[in-house]
Image: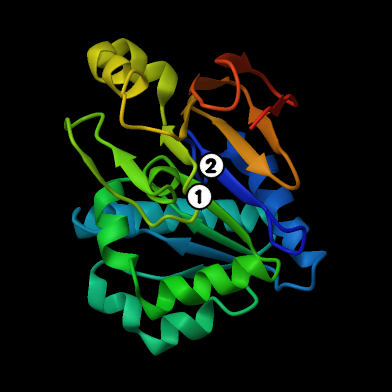
Amino acid sequence: METNRGAIALVGSGEYLPQMQEIENDLLHLAISKGKKNTYIQIPTGAGKESTDRLDFWENRGREQSNRIGSQQIYLPVLRREDAFNEGFIEEVKNAGLIYFSGGDPGHIAETFMDTPLWSAIVEQWESGSSLAGCSAGAMAFGSKIIGIRRSHITPGLGLLPSIEVIPHYDKFLGWLPDRVSAAVIRTDADTTLLGIDEDTAVVFTGSWRVHGSGKVHILRSSITDPGIFSEGEILPI
């Protein structure tokens, strides 16, 4: 990745919660140091098929975190594909500090944003210094393929990180669905690096991939390095 790009974070779980406040604050201020605005953009597309009450829940949780950090919350209700053509939303992401995709359905995120003006605008801002984060479904959608853990199938992702696939909530999913996790690891058609990211844990790229948070990041499959388990502060050899 080029050094003029913003930071990017892949988060296992915990978006907008106090235990992830330090990470989100750091992402925001890295972008501010590159000339970006003190804005905290929430994109709840992963929950776009859920109830209004659930969407309100996520908006309120993001507002609480934004207030703790001292930033301006901007909530963008991109719930269906036509929303990703909204000129007002495209304007809102300009010079954003942190653009954050929260959890839910990763396939819905990819279907909503793929080949749209809003996704192009978000990538443009990241390439010029805005920080970009995806939690759970958001992290999964950034790859070129989305692994079906709850449902056994593979769907296209947004391709921002084409060499990486993500299993979020790894410490939880390993106990719930070990057969699905094992199937994802031993896939013979994959030439990507598969990361298992524990809850309340992130791996952040700012020149190298570094682990942040209370859990572990697991390299489960890779064509360029051996499998391994990495903790807070350690750099992934990918």
Q: Residue at x 53, y 42 (%)?
A: 10
Locate residue 216: give its quadrant.
top right
Of residue 148 and residue 232, the one placed in the foreground of this image is 148
- Residue 39 visible: no
Crowdedness near tag 2: few (<14), some (14–19) or many (≥20) residues, C-alpha within 10 Å: many
Left or right position of 31 against 228: right
Q: Which mark is residue 153?
A: none
Secondary structure at badge 2 equals strand
Residue designated by label 2: 10
Secondary structure at badge 1 equals loop
Residue 111 percent across, percent down from the top left: 25, 61
Residue 146 percent across, percent down from the top left: 32, 42
Q: Earlier in the sequence, mark 1 or mark 2?
A: 2
Residue designated by label 1: 161
**Above/below status of 87 relative to 231:** below
Residue 194 percent across, percent down from the top left: 45, 29
Crowdedness near tag 1: few (<14), some (14–19) or many (≥20) residues, C-alpha within 10 Å: some
Of residue 119 and residue 71, the one placed in the foreground of this image is 119
**Above/below status of 24 relative to 126:** above
Identified by mark 2, the residue type is Leu
Q: Are marks 1 and 2 in contact (CB under 8 Å)?
A: yes
Give the colour scheme shown: rainbow
**Above/below status of 216 relative to 210:** above
